[in-house]
Every structure is written in structure tokens, then in C-alpha cells.
Image: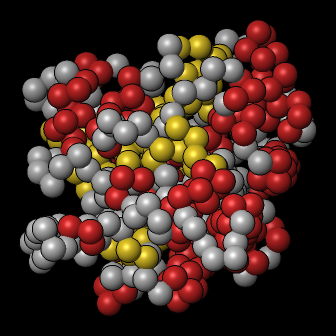
Amino acid sequence: MINSNLKTPVFANIKSSFCYLAANKITNLDIAKDICLENKSLSDVSMSILKHTGIFERRYAQPEEAASDLAIKAILNSSLNLNEIEALIVATTSGDYPSPATAHLVHKGLKLNKNVHCLDIASSCTSFISALRGSLGFVATNSNTVVIATEVKNKGLLKKDLRTRSLFADAASGVYLEKNNSKNNPDLFLFCYQESISSLSDRIYIPVGGSREPTNINNIHRNKLELNNPKETFFQIVKSISEAIEKSLETRQNYIKENFELDPVYIPGLIFIHQANKNIIKEVKSRFHKNIADKIPILMGDIGNSVCASLPVLRTRVLFLKSIFFSNQKIISKKDLIPYFIQLCNENNEFRFIHKEKGILFSSYWQNESIDIFDDGCDSLENSWLNKISEDEFNQLQTAFQNENISCQNKSVRLKYIDIWIAAGGGFQTLAMLHGKVY
């Protein structure tokens, strides 16, 4: 259901966005080797995965790692001052244990102050937006808050289940929020859409391991993620996301007109959607006019669907690429991306990459927000996410950035942008919010 009472904006500051890309790169061919299909070659299975998901590679954590480990690595490789953290909210559907909360294990690993408030949010693919909404209550009471989504989903999949193995991946990503005490340059948050269709909640679920059916020797094989009615689920997710976009666009338009007396067309904004499946997002885009569809980025072919972490991972990577584009406001070809990035690092101290013992840390800034991406397990820029992203996804982003550049020529406008963030969990819950920057 849509709730008209959600239209009250909240102001805070996102000081930092960060993400961690897990170390192990699993190709479609790797998955095909685990799954024997009659009359299908490994190449056939590999190509079928690409066709049905748009994913050619996904990231898995190390066998000994859990969700808290990925969250800890993401935070340690960000620009955060750990001593300033006063609340920690972890969004996850693959926590370390049923109890305690994974947030406490992250707290322990980071050696945070004992006064930090820790809690988990588990709400399928919508967990990150749910956590973000809750975090604003902490921020309003002067608590600097980390909201981080972290998933080690690969351990909860049946090795020979092609549907789930094709899609799901591991990652961690989050934001650091603080209260805007100065009232200058705040981030605007407006939660504008929520829908719960609980009758569909068995479409994507783990049937065994809870109080409904505790794990025992006879059912332990069912303590894995199940994807039911995939075709119906596909179109339900498309329908739910499309409705969320329509409602969000309407709210965005009305808010801009009523509060800034501006034409919404001239206020930049992207539509960030949980990266469930490339074909889902392409189907959603097909239902909208090109000027809307071009605002919807797809950036998942090289990392897969990291469940509730996919939305902040998407936004962090897109903002990093956007910062590169707006450094000269010109379209960059995919083949020139690495050389141009190296040039920026040499000429501009807002861009840098640091080789660490087991990976590369990428850093930049966008609209006073620090952006940090730690690519674990990569030993060179050529082997990093920056070079792995697909050419078609990169080129579509360049078009979106170019369109934003055209629409934001009026530098005197106080409202710099309003993006839309959307997550849909199996079609049974969909959430959407607006996020913008006011100067």
C-alpha cells in the first residue's frame, strides 16, 4: 500500500559511502562445472546464465569469512573515524549466527566504544532502505550512525541449484550519517513508497532453521535459500518496481515544485534500483519513456546480486564513476577509463588508488561525500572492478551522466539533485525513497 503520510522530509548528512567487493571471482563457467545438465555443454550453461541474468561474474567471500568480516573490511577501508561512531545498524539476510546480532560482531571486530548502539535489520532485499529509515531516528538525537549492508549469501545456496547460484553474490556497503547541525548543505531524505504483499513471502525464503521448523538431521538439506515460482516472481518484482518509480517520480515532482518553485526536469537525479537481475531492470526500463529509462543505471554484470547490499554497492560505484565523468564533463570510452583514472590520480588529490596487501582501495569525492571502494583480491587496475565492468553498462552510465550535465547548467539552484532509491524483496516488499542535496 502507498501511504501519503510518508511525505515528510528528514535532513541529515551522508559524510561517506563505501563498499567492499569480495575476493573470489566466480565466473559462469565455474558455476557450470558444478552443475551437470543433460545435453548441455559447459559453454551452453555459461551462456544461458548470462542470457537469463546478465551476470558474467560474481564475487564470493573466502570460505572462512562471514557477514561481519565483510562489514569490518568495508568500514576499515573507508574514511571513517571509528571513534566518532555512536550507532551501528547492520542490514543482512545472512548474519553470522541466529543470535547475537551481526552488528555486535562488527562492533567487536572494530573495537568500537562500548556506548555504541548496535542492531540488525533483516528484511530481505529491502533491508538496507529499512535500516536507513531507522537510522534517521538515531541521527536526529545526535548519534553519528553507520548503516551497512553485508551479505555472504553464497554459503546459503545449494551447490547444484542453477537459479540461485547464477544470481547471488557477496558484498558489503554502507553510509556514514551525521546530524546537520549547521543547517548548511544538508542531505534530504523523503520516504515515499512502501508496499508489503506478505502472501508472496514464500517466493524467496529459507524454509528450515527458524522456530517454525528447527534444523534437524532429517531436514538440514533444506536449510538453504529456495527460489519458487521464478517466472511469476520476475513479473511481480517488475510490477512492484515500476509502481514505485511512478509514485516516486510523482512525489519528487510535487516536492520540487512546492518547495523550490523549480521545474523538476532541470533538477538532476538518477533512479537507483536494487540489482536483482539485469533482465528485471531492463524490463522495468522498457515500461518508461527513454528520458526516464536513461536515469536507471545497471551495474551488476561483474559482481552479481548481493541482496540487500546491492543497492548501496550500486550507488557507491556509480558515484565513483560519476566523479570521474564530472572531472572533465566529457564522455570517456571504456578502453580509456583506466588511463584517464591514472591521469586524474596524478593531477587531482581527490582521486587516488592504494595497493594494499590483498587488494586495491579506490577513493574519490562526490558533492562533499567521500567515496571508498575496496576491491579485495585484485593485484592490478587491469584486474579490478574498474576494468571489469561491462562496456554496455558503462556506456549507458556515460549517457546518464551526460544528460545530468545538461540538466544542471544553472549553478545558482540550491537543490543540486534528487535521486530515487528503490529496493524490492521477492515482490513481497517494495520500498522507495528520495535522496537529494541542498546547498
Q: Quadrant of the N terminus?
A: bottom left
Q: Residue furthest top?
A: 346
Residue at the spot x=82%, y=31% of the render? 337
In terms of depth relative to the viewer, which is nearer, 390 or 41?
Answer: 41
Q: Position of residue 255 (x, y in %)?
A: 55, 65
Q: Position of residue 27 (x, y in %)?
A: 63, 49
In terms of depth relative to the viewer, which is nearer, 392 or 7?
Answer: 392
Q: Give the colouring mode of the picture.
A: secondary structure
Residue at the spot x=50%, y=48% of the render? 312
Q: Residue furthest front?
A: 39
Residue at the spot x=25%, y=19% of the render? 83
- Tell me, yes or no, if residue 59 can be seen here: yes
123 over 59 or under it: above or below: below
Residue at the spot x=78%, y=17% of the render? 342
Q: Position of residue 218 (x, y in %)?
A: 15, 74
Q: Position of residue 315 (x, y in %)?
A: 57, 47
The image quadrant of residue 198 is bottom left
371 over 284 or under it: above or below: above
Q: Quadrant of the C terminus?
A: top right
In terms of depth relative to the viewer, which is nearer, 25 or 352?
Answer: 25
Residue 255 in the figure: left or right of residue 123: right
Residue 56 in the figure: left or right of residue 201: right
- Tell me, yes or no, if residue 269 can be seen here: no
